[in-house]
Amino acid sequence: MRELAEGAAPWGLPVFVIGEFLRVATHPRVLHPPSSLEEASTSIEALLASPSLRILSPGERYWPLLRETLLEADSRGNLVLDAQIVAVCREHGVGTLLTEDRDFRRFAGIRIARLG
């Protein structure tokens, strides 16, 4: 992540990931101890300061892409967020996700790159 944030190559962050990071980082049943809201917010602000970062937000094609993505991977429940991330990436022409979440393998045409 540091290489991306400090590098010159453009990279994208789906807007949904910001809220999801805050949810997970501050959740007492996920992390022991959880991050404070201030700590988690500071981490997000550091990423957002990257001059090569592009925030990927839904546009006009988002809903049809999301619907297609949901149906193709039979995404329900917790997998809906993954489908949202994939749909907004597809809308912006992103084909590779940096993730440790194996659930993204279920989406055709998305290459997974691992952290580290």
Image: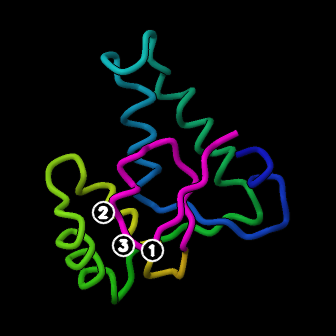
Amino acid type assigned to the residue bearing label 2 in the image = Ala
Q: Quadrant of the C terminus?
A: top right
Magenta span contains residue 111 = yes
Q: In front: 5, or 72?
A: 72
N-terminal of the pair, mark 1 or mark 2, is: 2
Residue 87 sits in quarter: bottom left
Q: In front: 116, or 39?
A: 116
Q: Secondary structure at mark 3?
A: helix
Tag of residue 87: 3
Q: Secondary structure at mark 1?
A: loop
Relative image position of residue 72 (x, y in whole percent) = 22, 72
N-terminal of the pair, mark 1 or mark 3, is: 3
Tag of residue 109: 1
Instruction: Please say which color scheme the image uses.
Output: rainbow
Q: For mark 1, does the 10 Å Cα neighbourhood hold few (<14), some (14 to 19), or many (20 or more) residues?
A: few
**Would you place residue 55 above or below residue 90 in this image?**
above
Amino acid type assigned to the residue bearing label 1 in the image = Gly
Q: Which residue is mark 2?
A: 83
Whether residues under marks 2 and 3 lie with C-beta atoms below 8 angstroms apart, the answer is yes
Q: Residues in magenta?
A: 95-116
Q: Who's the residue at 77% across and 63% down the image? A: 51
Amino acid type assigned to the residue bearing label 3 in the image = Ala
Q: Who's the residue at 45% across and 61% down the image? A: 15
Q: For mark 3, does the 10 Å Cα neighbourhood hold few (<14), some (14 to 19), or many (20 or more) residues?
A: many
